[in-house]
Image (tube, helix red, strand yellow):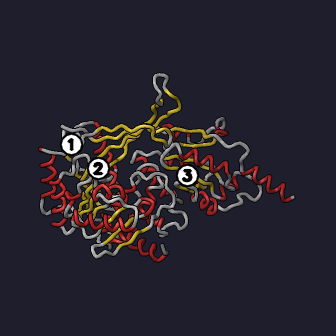
Amino acid sequence: MTHATNRRLAEILSALPTTRILVVGDLILDRYADGKANRVSPEAPVLVFEAGDERFLLGGACNVAANLRELGASTSVLGVIGDDEGGRQLRQLLHDADIDTQALVTDSTRPTTRKTRYVAKTMQVLRVDEESRAPVTGAAEATMLALLEQRPFPWKSVLLSDYGKGVLTPRVIQAAIKAAKSQGGVTVVDPKGKDYSIYRGVDLLTPNREEAEAATGITIRTTDDMHRAAAKLREITGIRTAVITLGKDGIFFETEDGSHRILPTEARQVFDVTGAGDTVVAVLTYARACGVPLEESLRLANHAAGITVAKLGTWAPSRREILARLGDVAPGSDGKILTLEQAIEVGNKLRAEGRRLVFTNGCFDILHAGHCDYLQRSRTYGDALMVGVNTDGSVQRQQKGPGRPFNSLDDRMAVLAALQAVDYVVAFDDDTPKDLIEAVTPQVLAKGEDWRDKGVVGREWVEQHGGQVVLVPLVQGRSTTNVVQKILQHGK
């Protein structure tokens, strides 16, 4: 994509106004149980999971709402929770994310949908689902319909997030479509199942390749297959433009006049595809609700999804992150290089979302294999890795040696930002990172195992705030000092 196109997309995104969007769909509480799975049970050939910390995150339609809120939309959710602890936790998480919960409906006859993932480092070893997939009926459905039938309708547009848990009944879907039309807004659906006739009347829907195949009965292998599937989707739902997400192959869309295009993926690295569909439908809905043309809306969604798949687990990219990716902020760093204020903001955001921020620090003057291994290992202890880097003055005060640092702060930060394992980089000018650690308050403080007897700066603060300190094994014989000595010996 050209720089001119990216510049245009950045201008569009920067100018998007705040608009009120209602997310209707299946609300899910994601629970992550972190632990170890290093041995096999003597009772049966299964792994023994040693439970450690647990985290709760927004899932399902809640994650879609979180994506919208991070973009700047005024976001509310309409869905059903149980009269249970999971429901109370979900309500609090939504409140903490600044998502309006006044439209939440409590149904004591069904549980709050909860998915528990047992995770050993970054590997998921088991998932347990607690849910009811029966269609919502009775008083709960009636309450949802009453909220959707109020006029004037309080929201501009509606996003339907269908995870097949029973909230989006045909009556609820049609009431949502009528509500959005009454405001001149759009209705976009992230669909589920095989019967797409229930979505007839929506403006856009965003099935992936497998979902489109299930709905149309057409196996999609070639461009001709995509055309036939698009025509079938238009026939079933009445939409004017068919959109099919293709994973690593990008996004296909075709209008009713037959004009079409495949927008190639904008992912630069893929760590986890979880939540990418939520990001696409959220950005697409927000942009279309603000009147952005379809192709530009899809391009923005593509860039945002490229950020999400580079993260572990679901991720709601902020407007600033997308602008950085488009080259409008911190060119070349992909938004990874932060000011102190931005680092504090990231720490607060991750903490509010229940995610684990790993922090480590160093000079990183001449990056070598030992550094790379250390940073990759550190990243496995959480959801994001932030690296604090000594400024040039800080390195000089440590008396690392004559002429140190060899590489300037800007160069050292740029190299670190280029590493897949590193999510954020921030500089500090003090002799130690103590003040930076206290400002960011990470959940995990990582240091090399050679610090075992030296006293890890920031340990007390992190542990007092419920975090942990991990000592990461180092690759023997790899150090900047050794690299410098080899260079000097070679030059003799």
Q: Is residue 56 left or right of residue 37?
A: left
Q: Position of residue 492 (x, y in %)?
A: 87, 58
Q: Is residue 14 visible?
A: no
Say the numbered circle drawn on residue 421.
Answer: 3
Seen as rendered, the residue at the extreme top is 43
Do the numbered discs 2 and 1 sit on residues whose CB atoms are within 8 Å? no
Q: Which residue is mark 2?
A: 163
What residue is drawn where x is 52% and y is 42%?
381
Q: CA distance from mark 2 to mark 1?
A: 12 Å
Give residue 445's quadrant in the image: top right
Q: Nearer the viewer, mark 3 or mark 2?
A: 2
Q: CA distance from mark 3 to mark 1?
A: 42 Å
Of pointers 3 and 2, the one earlier in the residue sequence: 2
Residue kind at label 2, given as amino acid type:
Tyr
Residue kind at label 1, given as amino acid type:
Ala
What residue is drawn where x is 23% and y is 66%?
235
Of pointers 3 and 1, the one earlier in the residue sequence: 1
Question: Helix, strand, or loop for circle 2?
Answer: loop
Q: Is residue 369 left or right of residue 492?
A: left
Residue kind at label 3, given as amino acid type:
Ala
Q: Is residue 359 visible?
A: yes
Q: Count all numbered tags in the image, as a single digit.
A: 3
Of pointers 2 and 1, the one earlier in the residue sequence: 1
How would you rate the neighbour count of disc 2 (Cα within 10 Å): few for under 14, some for 14-19, many for 20 or more? some
Q: Nearer the viewer, mark 3 or mark 1?
A: 1
Q: Which residue is mark 1?
A: 134
What residue is drawn where x is 55% and y is 56%?
426
Question: Helix, strand, or loop for circle 3?
Answer: loop
Give residue 262's quadrant in the image: bottom left
Vertically, is 338 above or below 290? Answer: above
